[in-house]
Amino acid sequence: MKQLKCACLEGLDATCVNVEATFTKGLPSFSIVGLATSSIQESRDRIKSALLTNNFKFPPKKITINLSPSDISKTGTHFDLSIALLVALNEEKMSFEDYYVFGEVGLDGKLKDTHSIFVMILSLKQQGVLHNVLIPQESVQKVSAIPNINIYAVDTLTQASDFFRFNNKQNHKVIPNNFTHKFIELNQTKYYYNTDYKLNYNDVKGQKIAKKASMIAAAGNHNILFEGSPGCGKSMITKRLRYIMPPMSLEEILEKAKLDCLDGIQPSFSPLRVFRNPHHSSTRASVFGGGSQAARMGEVALSNNGILFFDELPHFDKNILEALREPLEDYKILISRVNSKIHYRTKFMFVAAQNPCPCGNLLSLKKECRCNELEINRYKNRLSEPFLDRIDIFVTMNEVSSEDIADVSSSTLHKKVLQAFSMQKKRGQANLNGKLSDEELKKYCCMQEEAKQVLHTATLNLALSFRATNKVLKVARTIADLSLCETIQKEHILEALSYRKR
């Protein structure tokens, strides 16, 4: 019996699969067992054609391919190369050593990339089980970004066969891809950031408070809600937020690329954080994930380490808004289906925008509001208190006037965010301020005595919940970082309280 290593996906993680082959006497046949789906069963015809058109002998024996473990359902055309090599080299006495092999085989023997190859290799590397891998040349651009593994690439089935038959492995070794983005190095870790501001804050006139609030939200990864009349710049400011977000580690960039591949998008490996913007008519399954048999990711999971933006917040289905409370609080979500239960990480910045009333003119100084009190109350009551309690920063935006000017650029705001980010990492924080746990909050949020008294008084007078009090403390910690203060002072608490919902 011969065997090669491959893998299959279960949710976001890969599971090692041993591809085993036996060649016995009997009527010639070719069968694949081990809960293989139709995409794998069809590989028999692809492999037979590729072997015969490239001068390989197809053994006239009873060929049985087993994908072990056999109790896990497997799908994908990336098993083609493993199976083809076992058939092509059935008479060779060799060991395939510690190699994982991935690739789809064309009818002419040319090897092709699949969207899941990068995801599986990254997952296996994170598990510490993969060290050497053979892939198609088409996959090199993506896979070469993964550090600390030996990557070998071939173009055809013949080259893959020669790779194991002859000692020419160095001829096919891939040089790892080095990132050329700007970075800062903190605690011996590089954090990459973007300096191409395609959407710039110098396009936004006025709204000084909203722009400062967005900088605070970006620096600490805080959830933020903008409220204002139509056309005051809520969406405009939000779309520029991703360009001033904190830098990303290599692990975060690879995780973003992994989610892009699973979403069918070509990964860019850019340190620009993801921005997801579902429409308010989106279904619950599209937002949180679904699927009748296997669980599939939704917008909440795809926005991990990035921004999830809900425009026209009250128009979203109430069930969606209430279900959003768990991922906002626990930074994970469990999707349960008949054949699978999968945890997705949801450590995103939640950004929302809404009008003050159904017609949008309640805060306007120039237009008259057409809504009655009942309509306004019904509109605002779509957002429950437990949901709003998970928002860190609330900003009410005024109408823009002709006298307003653009007073700050994305570059200026981003420099301040980078300074605040550096302070957080130098303190040894694994998470940004907005995502600190209760234990981390006690460790990193040191306050002056006067600041403690102000927070205590505000908690009593404003009837702040325990969660809301922690939110104020987290925002104050970020304001202090932006001011380059290691200790939270009275003015930082007061400013953080000014961003609470009134």
Image: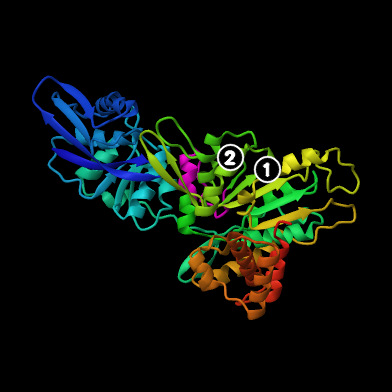
Q: Residue at 62% across / 39% down in the picture?
A: 318
Q: CA distance from mark 2 to mark 1?
A: 11 Å
Provide the residue designation for mark 1: 313
Residue 283 lies left or right of residue 179; in this view the side is right
Up-down: is 171 above or below 373? below
Provide the residue designation for mark 2: 320
Rendered location of residue 215, percent (x, y): 68, 61
* Closer to us: 105 or 213: 213
Q: Helix or strand or loop: what does disc 2 sit on?
A: helix
Residue at the far bottom in the pictured view: 449
Rendered location of residue 381, percent (x, y): 70, 43
Quarter of the view holding residue 55:
top left
The reply to whether residue 188 is visible in this rendering is yes
Residue 416 lies left or right of residue 57; in this view the side is right
Q: Which residues are magenta?
A: 256-274
Is-magenta flag for residue 383?
no
